[in-house]
Amino acid sequence: MFLNPLSLLPLLPPPSSLVTARIIRYTRRIMIVIIGIVVLFVMVFGGYVIAGGKLEPVLEAAPHEMITIGGAGIAAFLISNSMATIKGMGGAFGGLFKGPSWKKKDYMDVLTLLYLLTKTMKTKGIIALESHIENPKESNIFSQFPNILHDHFAADLICDTLRMMTMNMDDPHQIENHIDKQIEKHHHEALGPSHAMQSLADGLPALGIVAAVLGVIKTMGSIDQPPPVLGAMIGGALVGTFLGVFLAYGLVGPMSAQMAIVSNANATMYHIIRDVLVSYLHGNAVQVAVEMGRAGIPSEFQPTFAEVEEATNNAKVEG
C-alpha cells in the first residue's frame, strides 16, 4: 500500500503566502526543466526508434563512450577555469532550476530601502547616515530588508556609494561611472559559470569525435572479424560522435544559455540601485529618484506607482 504524500499536508504547519508563492515558482521552474529534458530524449530517441533504429547498440556503447567524453570534458573544464568559476557552478546550477533571484517583493524592498536611506540623508544630514552604512548588519534600516542585506554585492554597492557621497564626492557622472565599473566587474564574474559551460558545449562535439576515432582504431585492430561484428563495432564508435553532439546542443548549451539569462536578470537589481542614487545626486526629490528606479524593473516584477508610494509612505526608521 502506497502512502499518498498529499495526505501529509494537513500535518505540516501552514506556510506563509510568500513561502507558498516561492514553492510554486520553484516547482513550476523545475517542472519546465524536467519536461524539456523528457521531450528532448523522447523526440530524439523516439524518432530514431520509429525510423527503424534499435536502441541496443546505443545503450551498449553509451557507457564506454560517456567515460571518454565525460571524463575528457570534466578534465578540460577543470584545466580551463579558475577555482572561483568552479565554485560558482553550484550557485549557477541552482539558478538554472530556481530562475532569477530577485522577485517583485525584492524590488519593492530595495526601492523602500533606498527611499529610507536617501530620506534620512536629506532630512537629518550625512552624519545620521554614517551608522547605517558603516555597519549595515546592525542598522535598523537595513535589517528591515534581509534579502537585500544578504546579497553582499547589493549591500556593499549601496553602502560604498553612500559613503563616497558622505566624502563630498557628489558629482553624479563620476558616481555613475564608478557604479557602472563595479557592476560590470561583478557581472563579468557572475557570467563565469555560463561561459565555462558554453566552452564545454563547444568542445563536446570534438570530444565525441575523439571517442569515435578511438572506436575506429579498436575496430581496425579486429579487421579479421566477420562483417556483422565489424558493423557493430563501427556503430558503437559512431555513438561517440552522436553523444558529443547530442550533449552539446541538447543539454549543456541550453543550460549555459539559461545560466546567462539568470545572471543578466539578477544584474537588473544593481542597475536599479544605480538609477535611484544617481537620480538623487542629480537633485531630484527622493520620491522622483525612487520612481526612476521603478521604471527599470522588468515588467514581470514591476510594482505599480501606487504600490511603491504606499510602501514608501508606510516605511520608517525604527528605533
Image: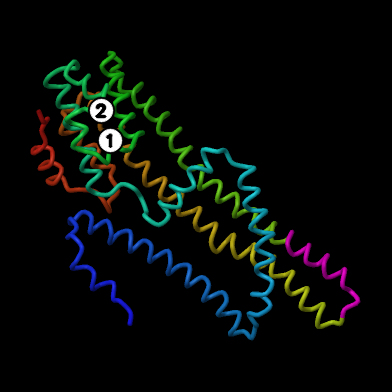
Q: Name the quadrant containing residue 224.
A: bottom right
Q: Residue furthest front?
A: 1
Residue 319 coordinates in the image, percent (x, y):
9, 28
Scheme by which the image is coloured = rainbow
Type of the residue with mark 2: Pro
Determine if the magenta segment contains residue 285.
no
Q: Is residue 146 above or below residue 204?
A: above
- Give the image location of residue 142, x and y in percent: 22, 32
Q: Residues within 10 Å of mark 1 (few under 14, many from 20)?
A: some
The foreground one among 262 and 25 is: 25
Residue 208 at what x, y percent from top left?
69, 61
Span shown in magenta: 210-225
User: Does 237 sit above or below residue 91?
Assistant: below
Question: In the rendering, which numbered label is found on residue 149?
Answer: 1
- The answer to whether the residue labelled 1 contacts the one labelled 2, judged by CB atoms less than 8 Å apart, is yes
Q: For mark 2, what is the residue? A: 136
Q: Foreground residue, 111 or 192?
A: 192
Q: Is residue 112 left or right of residue 42?
A: left
* Amino acid type, label 1: Leu
The alpha-carbon separation of the residues under discs 1 and 2 comes to: 8 Å
Taking the spot 24% from the left edge, 69% from the top edge, the residue there is 8
Q: Dot 1: what SS?
A: helix
SS state under label 2: helix
In the rendered view, tell whether residue 246 sits above or below residue 75.
Answer: below
x and y percent of residue 65 in the render? 69, 65
Query: Where the N terminus falls, by quadrant?
Result: bottom left
- Chief secondary structure of the magenta portion: helix
Residue at x 16% of width, y 19% of height: 128
